[in-house]
Image (cartoon, rainbow, N blue to C red):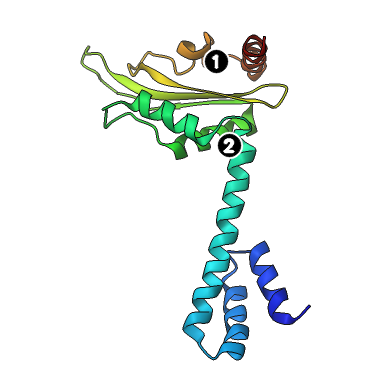
Amino acid sequence: MNTLATLIECIVKSPTNETLKLVTADAITEETGNYEQALITVNEIADAALQKRADCQEKYLLRGTTKKTILNQLAEANGRRRERTLTYEDVVNCIKQARKDGWHAVGGRVTNAYKYPAWQTACLTVIGFNKKVVVRIGVISARKSSSLTNPFCGLSITASAQQFRNWADSLMERMSA
């Protein structure tokens, strides 16, 4: 294997290493004579590697829940509101945190709603004992005393990870039956 191919393979493995990118661009310049085009090529290789890595990570995170499903649920829950909404990235971060803790909930808050109804988009993610991801997205009350978890699963935010996982597993059993 030649040196250039080895350098490109290293970029694919470590696409954020700037020094490696410059060394590879120098090697491509020796063959082509165009440094600017070499830098563009190296950055395109690194960007493609980063995108492929992100796609693989997203598939690992979601496992059975498609991005389209999540986007549809978010669009429905966010509705026409501009505040106290969630984005796709918020849901992915919620899933990442749930992978660490067993469950995670995210949503906006209103400090003082002046006794008027206030709504927020919330997401509850639970990783069951069978490693399946349960993602619930919906509209809940944004009042100070409202719970992020109770509307979705009937558990308070102080419940243990074990209780959330039991809920997720029983939900999966009901859905498969």
Q: In the displayed structure, would residue 116 be above or below residue 49?
A: above
**Labels 1, 2: front one:** 2
Q: In the displayed structure, would residue 112 be above or below residue 60?
A: above
> Which picture quadrant has residue 20?
bottom right
Q: Secondary structure at mark 2?
A: helix
Q: Amino acid at mark 1?
A: Thr
Percent x, y of residue 153: 53, 12
Instruction: Answer with left or right where residue 159 lies relative to residue 136.
Output: right
Q: What residue is rendered at 42% in x and 29% in y?
A: 72
Q: In the displayed structure, would residue 163 be above or below residue 37?
A: above
Q: Amino acid at mark 2?
A: Lys
Q: Quadrant of the C terminus?
A: top right
| Residue wearing tag 2 | 96
What whole-number distance in Å separates the C-alpha atoms at marks 1 and 2?
20 Å
Q: How many marks?
A: 2
* Mark with earlier residue (1, 2): 2
Q: What residue is rendered at 58% in x and 47% in y?
A: 55
Q: Secondary structure at mark 1?
A: loop
Crowd class of label 1 (few under 14; some 14 to 19; many from 20; radius 10 Å): few
> Which picture quadrant has residue 141?
top left
Front-most of residues 137 and 2: 2
